[in-house]
Image: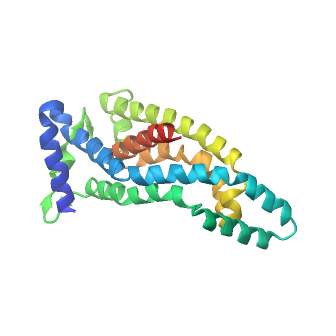
């Protein structure tokens, strides 16, 4: 944890001449961008996998007709088809899973009053007047439409726009490939049904986690939306 804290502090020192009191917040955004840049090759691979799965749909439709009365044989045949084409139905989840450690590091860093045996100095840093270790409930408690509350309103607005775009794109993707992953991995079809709504869960996340972690979430989801648009 202390090593990660020093990394955030060093990034903040680099950005301080440009962002002044909000340098730590800018460092978190930069850190998020670096994490997403590191996982970008996996995102590109996932996009290629999605296109490959889409190309398999005509053959999967044939398998569905051939094995309409034997669901177990259908699952095996679809799995064999994906194996033959070297396409994993789970490849799209990997970039997101690899980002979770970075999110939890930020969450814990800005949720603890101490780092090792010393006070956590990062909790004294703000974005405008919103403490990076604070929560939306704290901002609301300080008065509606104060500067801190407006910070959260901007974050909510960005997340709402990105979530709406992701919702539309995911629904379109699920509609275009209704048989692929669900026939291969048991239970994944149910995930596909709720996937279009998962983007809106980000609103809840931003509301309940420390502001530093919320900045990571907002930056990461915005990056994802742009990345998907570019790679699609």
Q: Position of residue 164 (x, y in %)?
A: 56, 35
Q: Say whether residue 186 is left or right of residue 71.
A: left
Q: Residue 83, relative to residue 153: is it above or below? A: below
Which residue is at 80% across, 69% downward?
Answer: 71
Q: Residue 134, relative to residue 186: is it above or below? A: above
Count of all numbered marks drawn on residues in the image = 0
**Image quarter of the N terminus:** bottom left
Which quadrant holds residue 2?
A: bottom left
Q: Residue 112, relative to residue 134: is it above or below? A: below
Q: Say whether residue 60 is left or right of residue 38.
A: right
Tell me, yes or no, if residue 146 can be seen here.
Answer: yes
Q: Position of residue 33 (x, y in %)?
A: 32, 44
Q: Nearer the viewer, residue 193 or 116?
A: 193
Q: Say whether residue 146 is left or right of residue 5.
A: right
Which residue is at 65% across, 41% downward?
Answer: 172
Point out the residue furthest to the right here: 69
Q: Position of residue 56 (x, y in %)?
A: 68, 55
């Amino acid at each position: 944890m202390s090593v990660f804290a020093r990394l955030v502090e060093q990034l903040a020192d680099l950005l301080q001449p440009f962002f002044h009191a909000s340098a730590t917040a800018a460092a978190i955004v930069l850190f998020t961008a670096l994490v997403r840049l590191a996982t970008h090759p996996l995102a590109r691979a996932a996009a290629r996998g999605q296109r490959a799965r889409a190309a398999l749909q005509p053959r999967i439709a044939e398998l569905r007709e051939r094995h309409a009365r034997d669901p177990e044989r259908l699952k095996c045949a679809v799995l064999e088809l994906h194996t033959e084409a070297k396409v994993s139905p789970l490849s799209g989840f990997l970039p997101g899973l690899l980002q979770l450690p970075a999110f939890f590091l930020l969450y814990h860093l800005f949720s603890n009053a101490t780092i090792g045996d010393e006070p956590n100095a990062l909790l004294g840093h703000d974005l405008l007047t919103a403490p990076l270790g604070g929560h939306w409930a704290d901002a609301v408690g300080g008065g509606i439409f104060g500067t801190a509350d407006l910070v959260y309103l901007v974050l909510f607005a960005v997340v709402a726009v990105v979530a709406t775009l992701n919702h539309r794109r995911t629904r379109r993707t699920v509609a275009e490939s209704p048989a692929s992953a669900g026939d291969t991995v048991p239970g994944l079809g149910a995930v596909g049904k709720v996937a279009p709504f998962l983007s809106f869960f980000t609103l809840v996340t931003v509301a309940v986690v420390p502001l530093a972690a919320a900045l990571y979430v907002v930056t990461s989801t915005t990056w994802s939306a742009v990345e998907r648009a570019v790679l699609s």
